[in-house]
Amino acid sequence: MGGTIEIQKMKLDLLHNIAIFVEVAQTKSFSRTSEILGMPKSSVSRRIAQLEKTLGLQLLNRTTRKIELTEYGKRYLQECLPILEQAEIAHEKLKQVREVPKGHLRISTPVDLALIWITPFLGEFSKLYPEITMDLDLSPRSVDLISEHYDIAIRIGKLPDSGLIVKHLASFPCFLFACPAYFENCDELTSPKQLQHHEFICVGKKREMPLTLVNGKDKIKMNVNGRFSLNNISAAIQLAASGLGIIVISEFMVKKEIETGKLVRILPAWNVAPVSVSALTTTRLLPAKTRVFLEFIAEKITK
């Protein structure tokens, strides 16, 4: 491991020394190179001497009045110029990736989120950024952003520790809803403590979930469960609207069911902890294509 690090350091020093040599060769002045590169004149001279020692050849003829390239210095300059030019081209190309929104974007998101916040706005987004193409994986599965080459994963709720960068997009209050028909065979709910004896439609991988209810300064924590767990919010809403259990969800996601009377809010004095919508990326240094998409979606979600 130590040997590998040392080799990498030698390579970096060599590239640095080459860049300094090219600047000296073009300005023919240690003083001018020192000013351009913002480093002491003595360091410039030392770096050139180090390069010559590595090569075993003299690159510059130095006098008190001027600096001239030796025969070997001229040959070395011609070999080194294309290397630096290629590095500059690579640098500029990546700067464009950072600054210009273009390229292919791969996004993983649950289907419900996509239908509510992404697909309705893709027409507008594509007009704003015509050079961005997109793949959408509509699945709640935990994709590996690095090995599967995803740019973004958008998720709902509490996230496990993963080492990924989490960008908070929005938070929404949640409430308890049920179909009126659900209570035809149940006692009327008057207290949150009764919820432990009721059926819940669980969104996730388990048929049991923690529930925290808040009413002003009062807070109640409990575990609730049900016969059904689903990884699709739309399907969970359908089950709740069919009278198969209580669902914990944001009001805007069941607006249609509320308007048609299929779902009603229960225990209206009590709120459930807000649910968060977050975007996961592998780095904070995002290319323009990723950055503009996240900004666009965050604006749509919070409207």
Image (cartoon, helix red, strand yellow):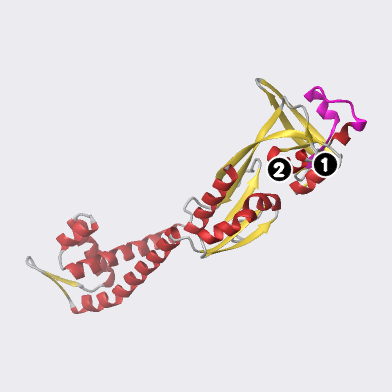
Q: CA distance from mark 1 to mark 2?
A: 13 Å
Relative side of 179 to 104, left or right: right
* Residue nearest the observer in this picture, 43 or 95: 95
> In this image, 13 relative to 156: left or right?
left
Magenta span of residues: 184-202
Q: Looking at this view, is 67 or 276 the one in front? A: 276
Q: Residue at x 72, y 24 (%)?
A: 269
**Relative side of 18 to 197, left or right:** left
- On whether residue 192 falls in the magenta region, the answer is yes
Residue type, numbered disc 2: Met
Question: Can residue 163 be seen?
Answer: no
Q: Identify the residue shown where x is 57% and y is 44%.
A: 169
Q: Position of residue 207 (x, y in %)?
A: 81, 41
Question: Element type at marker 2?
Answer: helix
Q: Position of residue 303 (x, y in %)?
A: 58, 43
- The image shows residue 250 at horizontal and vertical percentages of 69, 38
Provide the residue designation for mark 1.
241
Vertical position of residue 129 compared to residue 110: above or below: below
Q: Mark 2 and mark 1 in contact (Cβ < 8 Å)?
A: no
Q: In the displayed image of the protein, which residue is found farthest to the left?
A: 65
Is disc 1 surrounded by few (<14), some (14 to 19) or many (20+) residues within 10 Å?
many
Where is residue 145, by image quadrant? bottom right
Amino acid type indicated by mark 1: Ala
The label shown at residue 199 is: none
Among all residues in the image, which is located at the extreme top?
217
Question: Tag on residue 253?
Answer: 2
Q: Is residue 284 magenta?
A: no
Instruction: Evaluate whether residue 106 shows in this view.
Output: yes
Q: How many marks?
A: 2
